[in-house]
Amino acid sequence: EVQLVESGGGFLQAGGSLRLSCAASGFTFDDKAVAWFRQAPGKDREGVSCLASAVGDTYYADDVKGRFTMSTDNAKNTLYLQMNDLKPEDTAVYYCAADSYWGETCAQDYAYWGQGTQVTVSS
């Protein structure tokens, strides 16, 4: 059974940083389609950062470019999202997602999802 478990969310003031983690069991992130999504209250889920190809091209949503960085540690089988200079509009539940198959970046129907971790940024 595949499980993705996020951690690292929290409550912080604008300008701060957080690193989200997504630990996998029953699945390896190496050479897989992985992504981070978020969903704010009353809004649709949106792709924040999505690995676009096996060679490492990464998509970032316009409003997080230069502030967020996605990375993987294959030895720990963990996916990360480093978030810097956080803003109140970054407040959302953040989800990691993964799939063995490559589809349309951020738009594919990812097979595996974590349970989500809340990030709340105050002004």
Image (cartoon, rainbow, N blue to C red):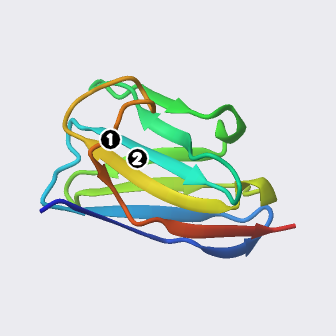
Q: Position of residue 120 (x, y in %)?
A: 69, 69
Residue furthest out toward the front? 42
The dot on residue 61 is none
- Quadrant housing the N terminus: bottom left
Query: Going 24% across and 37% down the picture, which residue do you hit?
Result: 32
Q: Which residue is mark 2?
A: 71
Query: Going 15% across and 54% down the picture, which residue do you hit?
Result: 27
Amino acid of disc 2: Ser
Amino acid of disc 1: Tyr
Q: Which residue is mark 1?
A: 110
Q: Secondary structure at mark 1?
A: loop
Vertical position of residue 60 compared to residue 112: above or below: above
Quarter of the image holding residue 14? Answer: bottom right
| Label 2 Cα neighbours within 10 Å, binned few <14 / some 14-19 / many ≥20 | some
Of the pair 74 and 38, the residue shown nearer to us: 38
| Label 1 Cα neighbours within 10 Å, binned few <14 / some 14-19 / many ≥20 | some
Lateral position of residue 110 relative to residue 16, left or right: left
Q: Position of residue 122 (x, y in %)?
A: 81, 70
Q: What is the spatial separation of the Cα atoms under label 1 and label 2, in whole angstroms?
A: 18 Å
Query: Going 51% across and 40% down the picture, which residue do you hit?
Result: 49
